[in-house]
Protein backbone atom coordinates (compact mmCIF):
# COMPACT_ATOMS: atom_id res chain seq x y z
CA UNK A 1 0.00 0.00 0.00
CA UNK A 2 1.40 3.40 -0.90
CA UNK A 3 1.89 6.10 1.70
CA UNK A 4 -1.07 8.10 0.43
CA UNK A 5 -3.32 5.03 0.54
CA UNK A 6 -2.19 4.31 4.08
CA UNK A 7 -3.09 7.87 5.06
CA UNK A 8 -6.47 7.61 3.36
CA UNK A 9 -7.17 4.40 5.24
CA UNK A 10 -6.30 6.05 8.52
CA UNK A 11 -8.59 8.99 7.80
CA UNK A 12 -11.44 6.68 6.81
CA UNK A 13 -11.06 4.60 9.96
CA UNK A 14 -11.00 7.75 12.06
CA UNK A 15 -14.41 8.47 10.54
CA UNK A 16 -15.66 5.03 11.60
CA UNK A 17 -14.99 5.97 15.22
CA UNK A 18 -17.88 8.42 15.00
CA UNK A 19 -20.40 5.62 14.39
CA UNK A 20 -22.66 5.21 17.46
CA UNK A 21 -21.80 2.32 19.80
CA UNK A 22 -25.02 0.48 19.01
CA UNK A 23 -23.92 0.01 15.40
CA UNK A 24 -20.54 -1.35 16.49
CA UNK A 25 -22.10 -3.91 18.82
CA UNK A 26 -24.23 -5.17 15.92
CA UNK A 27 -21.01 -6.32 14.24
CA UNK A 28 -19.65 -7.88 17.44
CA UNK A 29 -20.45 -11.42 16.30
CA UNK A 30 -18.27 -11.15 13.22
CA UNK A 31 -15.37 -9.87 15.31
CA UNK A 32 -15.68 -12.53 18.03
CA UNK A 33 -12.88 -14.65 16.60
CA UNK A 34 -10.34 -11.86 16.72
CA UNK A 35 -8.49 -11.91 20.04
CA UNK A 36 -7.88 -8.76 22.02
CA UNK A 37 -4.17 -8.08 22.35
CA UNK A 38 -2.40 -6.38 25.24
CA UNK A 39 1.37 -5.73 25.15
CA UNK A 40 2.87 -4.62 28.46
CA UNK A 41 6.33 -3.30 27.67
CA UNK A 42 8.67 -2.39 30.55
CA UNK A 43 11.57 0.05 30.23
CA UNK A 44 15.07 -1.18 31.16
CA UNK A 45 13.87 -4.29 32.99
CA UNK A 46 16.58 -6.95 33.07
CA UNK A 47 16.26 -10.66 32.37
CA UNK A 48 16.39 -11.52 36.08
CA UNK A 49 14.20 -8.73 37.47
CA UNK A 50 10.98 -10.73 37.94
CA UNK A 51 10.19 -13.91 39.85
CA UNK A 52 9.64 -16.24 36.86
CA UNK A 53 13.18 -15.38 35.64
CA UNK A 54 14.95 -15.71 38.98
CA UNK A 55 14.37 -12.50 40.96
CA UNK A 56 14.17 -13.12 44.70
CA UNK A 57 14.64 -9.70 46.31
CA UNK A 58 11.54 -8.06 44.84
CA UNK A 59 8.31 -10.06 44.84
CA UNK A 60 6.22 -10.36 41.68
CA UNK A 61 3.30 -12.64 42.62
CA UNK A 62 1.07 -11.55 39.73
CA UNK A 63 3.78 -12.21 37.15
CA UNK A 64 4.58 -15.52 38.85
CA UNK A 65 0.94 -16.51 38.40
CA UNK A 66 0.88 -15.16 34.85
CA UNK A 67 3.81 -17.48 34.02
CA UNK A 68 2.01 -20.42 35.65
CA UNK A 69 -1.06 -19.69 33.53
CA UNK A 70 0.89 -19.04 30.33
CA UNK A 71 4.17 -19.46 28.48
CA UNK A 72 7.59 -18.21 29.44
CA UNK A 73 9.92 -17.31 26.55
CA UNK A 74 13.56 -17.81 27.54
CA UNK A 75 15.21 -16.63 24.28
CA UNK A 76 13.12 -13.59 23.43
CA UNK A 77 14.99 -10.60 22.00
CA UNK A 78 14.43 -6.85 22.01
CA UNK A 79 17.10 -4.27 21.03
CA UNK A 80 19.95 -2.62 23.01
CA UNK A 81 18.21 0.76 23.55
CA UNK A 82 14.75 2.35 23.90
CA UNK A 83 13.73 3.93 20.57
CA UNK A 84 15.16 1.12 18.45
CA UNK A 85 13.37 -1.42 20.59
CA UNK A 86 10.02 0.35 20.23
CA UNK A 87 10.46 0.70 16.46
CA UNK A 88 11.23 -3.03 16.20
CA UNK A 89 8.24 -4.08 18.27
CA UNK A 90 5.77 -1.89 16.42
CA UNK A 91 6.97 -2.47 12.83
CA UNK A 92 8.37 -6.01 12.87
CA UNK A 93 11.63 -4.67 11.43
CA UNK A 94 15.15 -4.33 12.78
CA UNK A 95 15.79 -0.66 13.56
CA UNK A 96 18.50 -0.63 10.89
CA UNK A 97 15.94 -1.44 8.18
CA UNK A 98 13.77 1.58 8.98
CA UNK A 99 16.49 4.07 9.94
CA UNK A 100 15.90 4.07 13.70
CA UNK A 101 19.50 3.53 14.87
CA UNK A 102 19.52 5.05 18.37
CA UNK A 103 17.55 7.13 20.85
CA UNK A 104 15.42 10.20 20.04
CA UNK A 105 15.80 13.30 22.21
CA UNK A 106 13.12 15.98 22.77
CA UNK A 107 12.78 18.31 19.79
CA UNK A 108 14.58 15.93 17.41
CA UNK A 109 13.76 16.40 13.73
CA UNK A 110 13.52 12.61 13.16
CA UNK A 111 11.03 9.96 14.19
CA UNK A 112 9.53 6.67 13.09
CA UNK A 113 8.39 7.29 9.53
CA UNK A 114 4.57 7.52 9.51
CA UNK A 115 4.72 5.69 6.16
CA UNK A 116 5.81 2.53 8.02
CA UNK A 117 3.06 0.14 9.09
CA UNK A 118 2.78 -0.42 12.82
CA UNK A 119 0.90 -3.18 14.63
CA UNK A 120 -1.75 -0.54 15.33
CA UNK A 121 -2.09 0.23 11.59
CA UNK A 122 -2.39 -3.44 10.72
CA UNK A 123 -4.92 -4.23 13.45
CA UNK A 124 -6.93 -1.10 12.76
CA UNK A 125 -7.34 -2.37 9.20
CA UNK A 126 -8.96 -5.41 10.81
CA UNK A 127 -11.41 -3.44 12.94
CA UNK A 128 -9.47 -3.13 16.19
CA UNK A 129 -9.69 -0.22 18.62
CA UNK A 130 -6.12 0.84 19.37
CA UNK A 131 -4.44 2.74 22.19
CA UNK A 132 -0.90 3.50 23.27
CA UNK A 133 -0.58 4.27 26.96
CA UNK A 134 2.87 5.13 28.28
CA UNK A 135 6.31 5.90 26.87
CA UNK A 136 6.26 6.40 23.10
CA UNK A 137 9.83 7.43 22.21
CA UNK A 138 9.55 7.26 18.43
CA UNK A 139 9.68 11.01 17.84
CA UNK A 140 8.02 13.90 19.71
CA UNK A 141 6.97 15.99 16.70
CA UNK A 142 3.22 15.95 16.03
CA UNK A 143 3.90 14.11 12.76
CA UNK A 144 5.41 11.16 14.66
CA UNK A 145 3.09 10.80 17.66
CA UNK A 146 1.07 7.57 18.20
CA UNK A 147 -2.08 9.19 16.78
CA UNK A 148 -0.22 9.41 13.45
CA UNK A 149 0.95 5.79 13.66
CA UNK A 150 -2.34 3.89 13.85
CA UNK A 151 -3.40 4.56 17.44
CA UNK A 152 -6.86 5.98 18.18
CA UNK A 153 -5.67 7.25 21.53
CA UNK A 154 -2.45 8.16 23.31
CA UNK A 155 -1.73 8.98 26.95
CA UNK A 156 1.76 9.22 28.38
CA UNK A 157 5.20 10.75 28.72
CA UNK A 158 6.32 10.57 25.08
CA UNK A 159 10.00 9.87 25.77
CA UNK A 160 12.37 8.78 28.55
CA UNK A 161 11.63 10.11 32.03
CA UNK A 162 15.23 11.34 32.36
CA UNK A 163 14.86 13.70 29.39
CA UNK A 164 13.56 16.53 31.57
CA UNK A 165 14.03 20.05 30.21
CA UNK A 166 13.59 23.34 32.10
CA UNK A 167 10.35 25.14 31.23
CA UNK A 168 10.60 28.66 29.91
CA UNK A 169 8.05 29.82 32.51
CA UNK A 170 9.51 28.52 35.76
CA UNK A 171 12.89 26.99 34.89
CA UNK A 172 11.76 23.79 36.58
CA UNK A 173 12.94 20.57 34.97
CA UNK A 174 9.94 18.61 33.77
CA UNK A 175 8.68 16.03 31.30
CA UNK A 176 5.39 16.48 29.43
CA UNK A 177 2.32 14.30 29.90
CA UNK A 178 0.52 14.10 26.57
CA UNK A 179 -3.09 13.12 25.84
CA UNK A 180 -3.50 12.31 22.14
CA UNK A 181 -1.53 15.23 20.65
CA UNK A 182 -1.85 17.75 23.47
CA UNK A 183 0.41 18.42 26.46
CA UNK A 184 -1.95 18.27 29.44
CA UNK A 185 0.57 18.54 32.29
CA UNK A 186 4.24 19.13 32.97
CA UNK A 187 5.54 16.67 35.53
CA UNK A 188 8.43 17.25 37.94
CA UNK A 189 10.50 14.25 38.99
CA UNK A 190 8.48 13.98 42.20
CA UNK A 191 5.20 13.90 40.25
CA UNK A 192 6.48 10.92 38.28
CA UNK A 193 5.72 8.73 41.29
CA UNK A 194 2.07 8.53 40.24
CA UNK A 195 2.83 7.61 36.64
CA UNK A 196 2.38 3.82 36.93
CA UNK A 197 -0.95 4.33 38.71
CA UNK A 198 -2.16 6.89 36.16
CA UNK A 199 -1.17 4.77 33.18
CA UNK A 200 -2.87 1.77 34.76
CA UNK A 201 -6.12 3.70 35.34
CA UNK A 202 -6.05 4.80 31.72
CA UNK A 203 -5.36 1.25 30.49
CA UNK A 204 -8.22 -0.19 32.54
CA UNK A 205 -10.52 2.55 31.22
CA UNK A 206 -9.59 1.72 27.61
CA UNK A 207 -10.23 -1.99 28.15
CA UNK A 208 -13.63 -1.31 29.77
CA UNK A 209 -14.67 1.08 27.02
CA UNK A 210 -13.75 -1.39 24.29
CA UNK A 211 -14.84 -4.66 25.87
CA UNK A 212 -17.38 -5.28 23.11
CA UNK A 213 -14.98 -5.24 20.15
CA UNK A 214 -11.45 -6.37 19.44
CA UNK A 215 -8.84 -4.05 20.90
CA UNK A 216 -5.09 -3.63 20.85
CA UNK A 217 -3.61 -2.04 23.95
CA UNK A 218 0.06 -1.15 23.66
CA UNK A 219 1.12 -0.40 27.23
CA UNK A 220 4.79 0.72 27.37
CA UNK A 221 5.56 1.77 30.94
CA UNK A 222 7.87 4.61 31.94
CA UNK A 223 9.09 2.34 34.76
CA UNK A 224 11.67 1.04 35.56
CA UNK A 225 13.91 3.58 33.78
CA UNK A 226 15.78 6.12 35.94
CA UNK A 227 14.83 8.32 37.76
CA UNK A 228 13.23 5.53 39.80
CA UNK A 229 9.92 6.83 41.17
CA UNK A 230 7.72 4.17 42.77
CA UNK A 231 4.26 5.18 43.98
CA UNK A 232 3.76 6.04 47.64
CA UNK A 233 2.07 2.75 48.45
CA UNK A 234 5.14 0.85 47.22
CA UNK A 235 7.96 2.97 48.65
CA UNK A 236 10.21 1.01 51.02
CA UNK A 237 8.18 -2.17 50.59
CA UNK A 238 10.56 -4.43 48.65
CA UNK A 239 13.87 -5.92 49.74
CA UNK A 240 15.67 -4.28 46.84
CA UNK A 241 15.50 -0.52 47.42
CA UNK A 242 13.45 1.81 45.26
CA UNK A 243 14.24 -0.21 42.12
CA UNK A 244 12.61 -3.28 43.66
CA UNK A 245 9.72 -1.12 44.87
CA UNK A 246 9.04 0.04 41.32
CA UNK A 247 9.18 -3.52 39.95
CA UNK A 248 6.61 -4.48 42.60
CA UNK A 249 4.39 -1.60 41.47
CA UNK A 250 4.64 -2.89 37.90
CA UNK A 251 3.56 -6.30 39.18
CA UNK A 252 0.53 -4.65 40.82
CA UNK A 253 -0.27 -2.92 37.51
CA UNK A 254 -0.12 -6.21 35.61
CA UNK A 255 -2.50 -7.62 38.20
CA UNK A 256 -5.00 -4.82 37.65
CA UNK A 257 -5.00 -5.41 33.89
CA UNK A 258 -5.48 -9.17 34.37
CA UNK A 259 -8.20 -8.64 36.99
CA UNK A 260 -10.04 -6.29 34.63
CA UNK A 261 -9.95 -8.86 31.81
CA UNK A 262 -11.29 -11.51 34.17
CA UNK A 263 -14.08 -9.29 35.51
CA UNK A 264 -15.16 -8.50 31.96
CA UNK A 265 -14.99 -12.21 31.02
CA UNK A 266 -12.37 -11.44 28.41
CA UNK A 267 -9.70 -13.85 29.69
CA UNK A 268 -10.12 -16.39 26.92
CA UNK A 269 -10.49 -13.71 24.28
CA UNK A 270 -7.29 -11.88 25.17
CA UNK A 271 -3.62 -12.52 24.53
CA UNK A 272 -1.45 -10.65 27.04
CA UNK A 273 2.26 -10.24 26.34
CA UNK A 274 4.64 -9.01 29.04
CA UNK A 275 8.20 -8.08 28.01
CA UNK A 276 10.94 -5.43 28.28
CA UNK A 277 12.61 -3.04 25.83
CA UNK A 278 16.24 -3.79 26.71
CA UNK A 279 18.47 -5.08 29.48
CA UNK A 280 19.28 -3.43 32.81
CA UNK A 281 21.17 -0.12 32.95
CA UNK A 282 24.08 -1.54 34.90
CA UNK A 283 26.02 1.71 35.43
CA UNK A 284 23.10 2.98 37.53
CA UNK A 285 24.10 0.59 40.34
CA UNK A 286 21.18 -0.14 42.68
CA UNK A 287 18.87 1.89 40.38
CA UNK A 288 19.61 -0.50 37.52
CA UNK A 289 18.26 -4.02 37.27
CA UNK A 290 19.89 -7.42 36.86
CA UNK A 291 20.30 -9.76 33.91
CA UNK A 292 22.33 -12.54 35.55
CA UNK A 293 23.39 -15.11 34.52
CA UNK A 294 23.48 -13.26 31.21
CA UNK A 295 26.52 -11.17 30.31
CA UNK A 296 26.19 -7.39 29.80
CA UNK A 297 23.31 -4.94 30.03
CA UNK A 298 21.49 -2.09 28.29
CA UNK A 299 23.28 -0.70 25.25
CA UNK A 300 25.07 -3.98 24.59
CA UNK A 301 24.56 -6.87 22.19
CA UNK A 302 25.72 -9.36 24.79
CA UNK A 303 22.68 -11.41 25.81
CA UNK A 304 22.11 -9.25 28.92
CA UNK A 305 21.52 -6.19 26.74
CA UNK A 306 18.85 -7.65 24.52
CA UNK A 307 17.40 -10.91 25.88
CA UNK A 308 14.37 -9.89 27.90
CA UNK A 309 12.00 -11.55 30.41
CA UNK A 310 8.88 -12.46 28.44
CA UNK A 311 5.59 -14.11 29.34
CA UNK A 312 2.53 -14.66 27.16
CA UNK A 313 -0.87 -15.62 28.53
CA UNK A 314 -4.02 -16.64 26.69
CA UNK A 315 -6.16 -19.09 28.69
CA UNK A 316 -7.53 -21.90 26.55
CA UNK A 317 -5.01 -21.28 23.76
CA UNK A 318 -1.56 -21.12 25.37
CA UNK A 319 -0.75 -24.15 27.55
CA UNK A 320 -0.37 -23.26 31.25
CA UNK A 321 3.11 -23.38 32.83
CA UNK A 322 4.75 -23.89 29.44
CA UNK A 323 8.23 -22.76 28.42
CA UNK A 324 9.45 -21.85 24.96
CA UNK A 325 13.23 -21.87 24.41
CA UNK A 326 13.08 -21.17 20.67
CA UNK A 327 14.61 -17.95 19.40
CA UNK A 328 11.92 -15.28 19.00
CA UNK A 329 11.61 -11.57 19.65
CA UNK A 330 9.67 -8.36 19.54
CA UNK A 331 10.06 -8.20 15.73
CA UNK A 332 7.82 -11.28 15.55
CA UNK A 333 4.87 -9.69 17.33
CA UNK A 334 3.46 -7.79 14.33
CA UNK A 335 3.16 -10.78 11.97
CA UNK A 336 1.93 -12.95 14.87
CA UNK A 337 -0.83 -10.56 15.87
CA UNK A 338 -1.92 -10.03 12.27
CA UNK A 339 -2.12 -13.81 11.80
CA UNK A 340 -4.12 -14.25 15.02
CA UNK A 341 -6.48 -11.53 13.81
CA UNK A 342 -7.06 -13.54 10.65
CA UNK A 343 -4.89 -11.52 8.28
CA UNK A 344 -1.61 -11.82 6.44
CA UNK A 345 1.20 -9.30 6.22
CA UNK A 346 1.80 -8.16 2.61
CA UNK A 347 5.17 -9.11 1.10
CA UNK A 348 6.06 -5.44 0.66
CA UNK A 349 7.27 -3.50 2.54
CA UNK A 350 9.64 -6.21 3.74
CA UNK A 351 9.67 -6.97 7.48
CA UNK A 352 12.10 -9.09 9.49
CA UNK A 353 9.73 -10.78 11.96
CA UNK A 354 7.84 -14.04 11.48
CA UNK A 355 4.51 -15.35 12.75
CA UNK A 356 5.34 -17.20 15.99
CA UNK A 357 1.76 -18.30 16.70
CA UNK A 358 2.85 -21.97 16.17
CA UNK A 359 5.10 -21.53 19.23
CA UNK A 360 2.34 -19.92 21.31
CA UNK A 361 -0.24 -22.50 20.36
CA UNK A 362 2.09 -25.46 21.00
CA UNK A 363 2.21 -26.49 17.34
CA UNK A 364 5.98 -26.09 17.09
CA UNK A 365 9.03 -25.81 19.31
CA UNK A 366 11.34 -24.57 16.54
CA UNK A 367 12.28 -20.97 15.89
CA UNK A 368 10.27 -19.56 13.01
CA UNK A 369 13.27 -17.56 11.78
CA UNK A 370 16.50 -18.60 10.07
CA UNK A 371 18.54 -16.50 12.50
CA UNK A 372 18.48 -13.58 14.90
CA UNK A 373 20.61 -10.52 14.19
CA UNK A 374 22.09 -8.30 16.90
CA UNK A 375 22.44 -4.72 15.70
CA UNK A 376 24.00 -1.85 17.65
CA UNK A 377 22.85 1.18 15.69
CA UNK A 378 23.62 0.25 12.06
CA UNK A 379 26.43 -2.11 12.97
CA UNK A 380 25.66 -5.79 12.92
CA UNK A 381 27.61 -7.15 15.87
CA UNK A 382 26.42 -10.74 16.17
CA UNK A 383 24.13 -13.39 14.74
CA UNK A 384 22.42 -16.35 16.42
CA UNK A 385 21.17 -19.59 14.93
CA UNK A 386 19.97 -22.33 17.28
CA UNK A 387 22.36 -22.44 20.24
CA UNK A 388 25.20 -20.76 18.33
CA UNK A 389 25.96 -17.06 18.58
CA UNK A 390 28.73 -15.58 16.47
CA UNK A 391 30.07 -12.17 17.49
CA UNK A 392 31.75 -10.34 14.63
CA UNK A 393 32.53 -7.00 16.30
CA UNK A 394 33.76 -5.64 19.64
CA UNK A 395 30.91 -5.56 22.16
CA UNK A 396 30.87 -3.17 25.15
CA UNK A 397 29.45 -4.71 28.34
CA UNK A 398 26.80 -2.03 28.78
CA UNK A 399 26.08 1.58 27.88
CA UNK A 400 28.90 3.72 29.27
CA UNK A 401 31.40 0.90 29.81
CA UNK A 402 34.49 -0.11 27.89
CA UNK A 403 34.98 -3.29 25.89
CA UNK A 404 36.54 -6.12 27.88
CA UNK A 405 39.76 -7.67 26.54
CA UNK A 406 38.16 -10.99 25.57
CA UNK A 407 35.48 -9.12 23.59
CA UNK A 408 38.02 -7.55 21.24
CA UNK A 409 38.99 -10.73 19.43
CA UNK A 410 36.77 -11.45 16.41
CA UNK A 411 35.03 -13.56 15.39
CA UNK A 412 33.90 -15.25 18.62
CA UNK A 413 31.58 -18.22 18.79
CA UNK A 414 29.48 -19.09 21.85
CA UNK A 415 27.18 -22.02 22.53
CA UNK A 416 24.33 -20.46 24.50
CA UNK A 417 22.75 -23.81 25.42
CA UNK A 418 25.96 -24.96 27.06
CA UNK A 419 27.03 -21.63 28.49
CA UNK A 420 24.44 -18.87 28.69
CA UNK A 421 27.00 -16.38 30.10
CA UNK A 422 29.11 -16.11 26.89
CA UNK A 423 32.60 -16.65 28.28
CA UNK A 424 34.17 -19.43 26.21
CA UNK A 425 35.06 -18.64 22.61
CA UNK A 426 34.65 -21.83 20.56
CA UNK A 427 35.47 -20.31 17.15
CA UNK A 428 38.66 -22.37 16.67
CA UNK A 429 36.84 -25.63 17.33
CA UNK A 430 33.97 -25.07 14.87
CA UNK A 431 35.22 -23.33 11.71
CA UNK A 432 32.24 -24.71 9.76
CA UNK A 433 29.70 -23.05 12.07
CA UNK A 434 31.71 -19.83 12.04
CA UNK A 435 31.66 -19.82 8.23
CA UNK A 436 27.91 -20.52 8.09
CA UNK A 437 27.01 -17.75 10.52
CA UNK A 438 29.49 -15.36 8.94
CA UNK A 439 27.76 -15.82 5.57
CA UNK A 440 24.38 -15.05 7.15
CA UNK A 441 25.82 -11.94 8.82
CA UNK A 442 27.39 -10.67 5.61
CA UNK A 443 24.12 -11.05 3.73
CA UNK A 444 22.07 -9.22 6.36
CA UNK A 445 24.68 -6.51 6.82
CA UNK A 446 24.73 -5.83 3.06
CA UNK A 447 20.93 -5.47 3.13
CA UNK A 448 20.41 -3.11 6.05
CA UNK A 449 23.69 -2.63 7.96
CA UNK A 450 26.64 -0.25 7.59
CA UNK A 451 26.86 2.91 5.52
CA UNK A 452 25.72 1.68 2.10
CA UNK A 453 22.83 -0.73 2.63
CA UNK A 454 20.70 -1.90 -0.28
CA UNK A 455 17.34 -2.23 1.53
CA UNK A 456 17.11 0.48 4.17
CA UNK A 457 14.01 2.68 4.26
CA UNK A 458 14.16 6.32 5.42
CA UNK A 459 13.14 7.65 8.82
CA UNK A 460 10.58 10.40 9.19
CA UNK A 461 11.98 13.93 9.17
CA UNK A 462 10.49 17.38 9.73
CA UNK A 463 12.06 20.69 8.72
CA UNK A 464 11.39 22.78 11.80
CA UNK A 465 11.32 20.63 14.96
CA UNK A 466 10.11 22.06 18.27
CA UNK A 467 9.91 20.78 21.81
CA UNK A 468 6.41 19.89 23.02
CA UNK A 469 6.39 22.78 25.51
CA UNK A 470 8.36 26.06 25.65
CA UNK A 471 11.74 25.23 27.14
CA UNK A 472 14.69 27.33 28.22
CA UNK A 473 17.11 27.70 25.37
CA UNK A 474 19.79 25.06 25.41
CA UNK A 475 22.10 24.41 22.49
CA UNK A 476 20.71 21.66 20.29
CA UNK A 477 22.72 18.43 20.52
CA UNK A 478 23.93 18.66 16.94
CA UNK A 479 25.49 22.07 17.67
CA UNK A 480 27.43 20.57 20.57
CA UNK A 481 28.73 17.89 18.23
CA UNK A 482 29.57 20.45 15.55
CA UNK A 483 31.46 22.53 18.13
CA UNK A 484 33.48 19.50 19.17
CA UNK A 485 34.27 18.73 15.55
CA UNK A 486 35.37 22.31 15.01
CA UNK A 487 37.82 22.04 17.87
CA UNK A 488 39.25 18.85 16.42
CA UNK A 489 39.56 20.46 12.98
CA UNK A 490 41.28 23.49 14.44
CA UNK A 491 43.79 21.28 16.24
CA UNK A 492 44.56 19.37 13.11
CA UNK A 493 45.16 22.65 11.25
CA UNK A 494 47.47 23.84 14.04
CA UNK A 495 49.53 20.68 13.87
CA UNK A 496 50.22 21.05 10.15
CA1 LIG B 1 14.93 1.22 27.66
Image (tube, grey):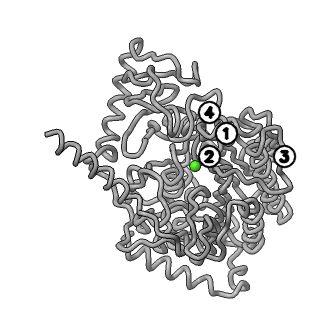
Q: Earlier in the sequence, mark 3 or mark 1?
A: 3
Distance (Cα) linking label 1 and label 4: 23 Å
Which is closer to the viewer, label 3 or label 1?
A: 3
Looking at mark 2, is its residue's CB closer than 8 Å to ligand 1? yes
How many residues crowd around disc 3 within 10 Å: few (fewer than 14), some, or many (20 or more)? some
Residue at position x 38%, y 76% from top? 4
Q: Residues within 10 Å of mark 1 (few under 14, many from 20)?
A: many
Residue that label 2 marks: 44
Q: CA distance from mark 2 to mark 4?
A: 22 Å
Q: Is residue 249 left or right of residue 411?
A: right
The residue under label 3 is: 236
Find numbered disc 4 in the image and state the secondary structure of the residue it sits on. Answer: loop
Does dot 1 land on a helix, a strand or a loop? loop
- The reply to whether dot 3 and dot 1 touch (C-beta < 8 Å) is no
Mark 3 lies within 8 Å of ligand 1 (Cβ measured): no
Q: Which residue is mark 4?
A: 325
Picture coordinates of residue 400, whole percent (x, y): 50, 38
| x and y percentages locating residue 461 in the rendered image | 37, 67
Amino acid sequence: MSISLKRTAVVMLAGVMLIPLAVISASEGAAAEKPNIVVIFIDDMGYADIGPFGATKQKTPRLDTMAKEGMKFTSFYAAPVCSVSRAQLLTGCYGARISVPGVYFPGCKNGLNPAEFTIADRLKERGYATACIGKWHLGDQTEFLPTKQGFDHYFGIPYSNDMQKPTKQTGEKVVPLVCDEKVIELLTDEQQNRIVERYTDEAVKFICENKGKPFFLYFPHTAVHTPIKPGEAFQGKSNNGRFGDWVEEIDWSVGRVLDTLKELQLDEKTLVVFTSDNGPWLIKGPDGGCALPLRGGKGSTWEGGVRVPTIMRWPGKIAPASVCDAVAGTIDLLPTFVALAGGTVPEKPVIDGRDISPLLLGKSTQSQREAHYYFASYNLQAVRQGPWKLAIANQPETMGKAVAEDAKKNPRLYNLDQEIGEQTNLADKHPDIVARLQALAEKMSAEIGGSSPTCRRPSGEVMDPKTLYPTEDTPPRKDKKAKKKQVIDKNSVTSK
